[in-house]
Image: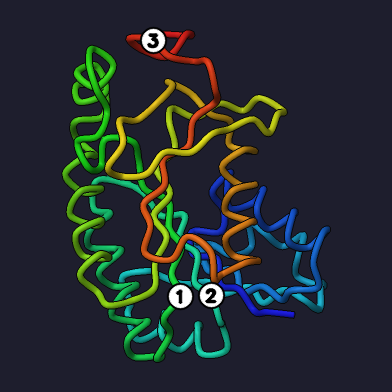
Amino acid sequence: MAKIMIIGAYGKMAQLLTEKLLNETNDELILFLRNAQRLNKYADNPRVELVDGDVLDTDQLADAMQEAEIIYSNLGGVDLADQIQSVLNAMKLAQKERFVYISSLGAHHEVPGKYGEWNEQAIGAYLPGFRKAAQLVSESGLKYTEIRPAWLTDKDEVAYETTQVDEPFKGTEVSRKSVADFAFQVVTQPQTHVNESVGLNKPDTDGDKPSWI
């Protein structure tokens, strides 16, 4: 049994991961988020600790993760690098070393062709934050896993393949349920994918842009 901290716990993938961990393991969870009452459905669960907090409050974050063995981040936004820096600082303060986090396709200029060009335009405001965050994590000295999903869907399916950071990204889409499944595999087997940046996509979805756009 492990204790896992989920930062940004109200995110859709974070909630999918939470449910999977509660249903399929005996692990205990620390759910860190703003307005923690939004997850009050877990308030009476003895395996869940809800923490209402601000990720940019490094000291609060460090205090909250004291008992955690694995830190998972579902954070996003244009200020992602600042948020990730606070998480890394908190992990150093709390003497934690295993970090798993959600990034994005394009964080390493790894998306080829017309799809890569389209992606640069579509999420251009966010990519600098993803890229800076990836640099901060890779230079942190922590044992990390970066997860770079394709464009996300809410399809009820688990269907994905992986690419490494030195390989061209494949596919245009992947379900949130698939990303949560891969994250589950990593946090429950933390000796796997150490210091790797892993791309996730649904097989056979290659194209110049996601099919629904």
The disc, 2 or 1, on the residue closer to the chain's N-terminal end is 2
146 lies left or right of 46 = left
The disc, 1 or 3, on the residue closer to the chain's N-terminal end is 1
Of the 4 image quadrants, the one containing the C terminus is: top left
Which residue matches tag 1? Answer: 98
- Residue shown at the point (56%, 82%) measured from the top left: 68
Picture layout, residue 138 above or below residue 209: below
- Residue shown at the point (83%, 58%) measured from the top left: 23
43 lies left or right of 209 = right
Between 82 and 24, the one nearer to me in the picture: 24
Single out the residue that lies furthest toward the front. Answer: 167
- Residue shown at the point (48%, 9%) measured from the top left: 212
Which residue matches tag 2? Answer: 70
User: Which circle marks residue 207 in the picture?
Assistant: 3
Picture layout, residue 140 above or below residue 206: below
Q: Residues within 10 Å of mark 3 (few under 14, many from 20)?
A: some
Q: CA distance from mark 2 to mark 1?
A: 5 Å
The disc, 3 or 2, on the residue closer to the chain's N-terminal end is 2
x and y percentages locating residue 13 in the rendered image: 58, 46
Between 94 and 113, the one nearer to me in the picture: 113
Q: CA distance from mark 3 to mark 2?
A: 36 Å
Contact (Cβ within 8 Å) of mark 3 with mark 2: no
3 vs 2, front mark: 3
Q: Residues within 10 Å of mark 1 (few under 14, many from 20)?
A: many
User: Which circle marks residue 184 in the picture?
Assistant: none
Q: Quadrant of residue 196?
A: bottom left
